[in-house]
Amino acid sequence: MQEIRIERTTAPKAKPQDESKLGFGKIFTDHMYVMEYNPDKGWHDPKIVPYQPISLDPSAMVFHYGQEMFEGMKAYKTEDGRVLLFRPDKNIERANNSNRRLCIPEIPADDFLNAIKTLVAVDADWIPTAPGTALYIRPFVIATDPFLGVRPSDTYKFIIILSPVGAYYESGLDPVKIWIEDEYVRAVRGGIGEAKTGGNYVASLAAQMKAHDEGYSQVLWLDGVERKYIEEVGAMNIFFKINGTVVTPKLNGSILPGVTRASCIDLCKHWGLPVEERRISVDELVEAARTGALEECWGSGTAAVISPVGHLRFEDEVMQISDGGIGPVSQKLYDTVTGIQTGKVEDTLGWTVEIK
């Protein structure tokens, strides 16, 4: 594990005074982590420096061919002052899976985790403590070769920035309305849908704008081949409770393997709930909604944690789920996951890592 050089800021920023108005991803802490890569030295020169703009050549390959990976995770401060990460090993594993798919050199897991721990420790005073808040952690890698040909870059920057955040959706835990997209597609098996990379998200923007214009918060994607099987929401994985069984789309190469998704599955099984990971057609979903078999629906992700879904729309059919409010499983998952993350619920599954 490489030693990290730390250069502390001499001009600290003013911290937010009202944690109820943090929003999401608008405020950034005093420091950032940077590590370089080249073929001769590999990953080298890890350092923490004051938060600042990045200087890159206009021909840097990330601008032209989108060779970049990013991750999202959070740090939490408990009532007794401890700082916790939630399953960081899973994010690091997924980051390196993305790196492999995108021809980016893998980052040693111990250096990755040490970078997160050290940066969060340096900026620990920025961790908010109001209910529903956290310190969002954004690691990312960008290709930096000054070259206009199409090939994997030889040089990269690995950067981590931090942002104190509130709820991802302004509505908080109030159920959101989801638009099932039948025109655009997000990804197909064999593509980069299971990698966490910007191209997957920019591909979602046109449908997201269409959904917003119709008063819907997010887009639920169908598969890109048959256009009939449920995949995921723009910023979340998706779950349904149908006739007492928790159902979520099976990972198939075009769905992002969410860390919160895996945690929901583990918890539901731990509680003795029947869980199925399988293909779910939109026709099955519509029929379940019509007959009342669709009892609950929620999304899961690092940003939103658990987001209950009150309404779905497919073509001209609007489906209200149960009474349109948060369901008991959604509520229990939210309370348990956030409780473990903030130290209010005992972590019997060994998911948290303390930063000391």
Image (cartoon, rainbow, N blue to C red):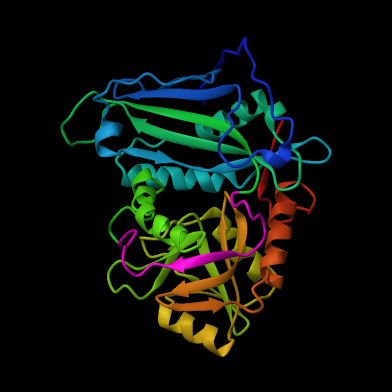
**Which residue appears farthest toward the top when viewing the image?**
10
Judge by depth and name the residue closer to the eye, 93 or 332: 332
Residue at image coords 68%, 63%: 333
Question: Could you tell me if residue 170 is visible in this image?
Answer: yes
231 versus 246 height, above or below: above
The answer to if 54 sits in the magenta stretch is no
Q: Nearer the viewer, residue 204 or 109?
A: 204
In this rendering, the count of numbered labels is 0
Residue 322 in percent (x, y) is at 64, 79
Could you tell whether 304 is left or right of 188 in the image? right
Report if residue 172 lies within the magenta region.
yes
Q: Residue at x 41, y 47 (%)?
A: 196
**Vertical arrangement, residue 212 with respect to residue 122, above or below:** below
Q: In which quadrant of the rendered view does residue 9 lie?
A: top right
Residue 52, placed above or below residue 286: above
> Which residue is outermost to the right?
80
How would you classify the magenta stretch by its main secondary structure?
Answer: loop
Residue found at the far bottom of this picture? 291
Where does the magenta region start and end?
Answer: 168-188
Name the side, left or right, on which 218 lies relative to 41: right
Residue in view at x 70 percent, y 53 percent: 338
**Residue 113, x across and y down, in percent:** 56, 35
**Quadrant housing residue 187:** bottom left
Can residue 233 be seen at all in this image of the molecule? Answer: no
Question: Residue 93, percent across and down?
Answer: 48, 46
Locate residue 356, reporting x and y percent: 72, 30
